[in-house]
Image (tube, rainbow, N blue to C red):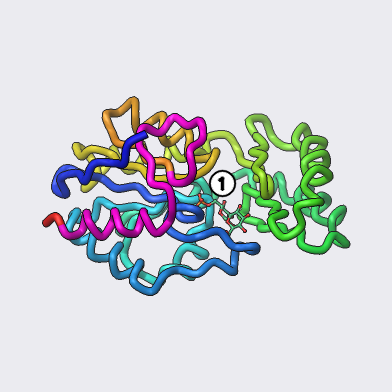
Amino acid sequence: MQKPPVPELSETALFLDIDGTLVEHASHPDAVRVAPELAHILGDLNQKLDGAVAFVTGRNLAMVERLFGEIGLAAAGTFGIELMLGEERETGHEAAALVAPAFTALEEKFAAADGVYFEHKGPVLAIHTRAAPEALPAVIAQCRETLPLLPDGYRLVEGHAGVEFLPEGATKSAAIAWFMNRPPFRDRVPVFLGDDTSDEIGFEWTNQNGGVSVRVGPAKPTAARHVLETVPEVHDWLKQLARTS
Ligand SMILES: O=P(O)(O)OC[C@H]1O[C@H](O[C@H]2O[C@H](CO)[C@@H](O)[C@H](O)[C@H]2O)[C@H](O)[C@@H](O)[C@@H]1O
């Protein structure tokens, strides 16, 4: 697969996944390190693209701000449940209260499991096993039992280092579409960089809408049409993009 082209800044809307794309993975969500120059590069690019740069991430917005500081980028957090564009904010989801008891019961089952981390994000629950890979099969089995107890439309995304429960409509494609319907994103070409299973639907949407989809990581079946193999390659590509003005 080819490297992505360096697009024309004035015609580009840039969508960026965080973990595995902008930052290297770590054994715990709080342990990732944001390269000092990254926030600067992103702020610079955001200015050059007239504000058409957005994070599109599974992390919640509070966590995004903790990682990057207030750099003024638009953002879709918690897989698009939280949306932020200038003064415009969409947050909250009616499912949060409904699912809380089931999520708490699940956490209690793993209270004694070292290295299994529950990240509660309102209607979304991530259970991380990167620090305890041997626990993953049991976590998946329990989660499959919990899924039918959740409201209709919930799905379980099973990864190699954990799982996430997501409500209907929480997708990266919907998040990207939300931005593309609004200025300054509207009428630009979407360029989406991501690295994992939850990004695939975003790649598909991007392809269907004339955009540039970029998967980050070693070769693997994907809907993306371009590849950058590593996080440092992503940083270099972003720097190259910023230099084109
Ligand atoms: O959409 P993303 O920006 O890629 O966010 C996806 C999830 O990222 C975080 O979890 C992942 O990264 C952790 C740090 O490297 C790692 O420990 C974990 O195994 C990964 O699943 C974040 O904690 C989640 O909330 C995001 O949904």
Is residue 84 something one can see in this rendering? Answer: no
SS under mark 1 = loop
Q: Quadrant of ligand 1?
A: bottom right
Which quadrant does the N terminus fall into? top left
Q: Toward which corner of the image does residue 51 lie, by quadrant?
A: bottom left
Residue under the image location 35 percent in, 68 percent down:
39
Residue 218 forms part of the magenta stretch: yes
Q: Toward which corner of the image does residue 94 lie, by quadrant?
A: top right
Q: Residue furthest top?
A: 208
Is the residue 95 above or below the residue 27 in the image? above
Is the residue 116 above or below the residue 124 in the image? below
Q: Residue furthest left?
A: 245
Q: Picture coordinates of residue 109 (x, y %)?
A: 87, 53
Count numbered badges in the picture: 1
Q: Which residues are magenta?
A: 216-243
Label 1 Cα crowd, 10 Å radius (few <14 / some 14-19 / many 20+) = few
Is residue 178 something one can see in this rendering? Answer: yes
Residue under the image location 51 percent in, 35 percent down:
220
Q: Picture coordinates of residue 232 (x, y %)?
A: 39, 59
Q: Picture coordinates of residue 178 (x, y %)?
A: 36, 40
Residue 127 forms part of the magenta stretch: no
Q: Is mark 1 within 8 Å of ligand 1?
A: no
Q: Nearer the viewer, residue 22 or 55?
A: 22
Q: Nearer the viewer, residue 193 or 173?
A: 193
Q: Picture coordinates of residue 26 (x, y %)?
A: 59, 62
Q: Amino acid at mark 1?
A: His
Residue under the image location 19 percent in, 54 percent down:
49
According to the image, label 1 marks what residue?
93
Residue under the image location 27 percent in, 29 percent down:
210
Q: Residue furthest bottom?
A: 36
Is the residue 3 above or below the residue 49 in the image? above
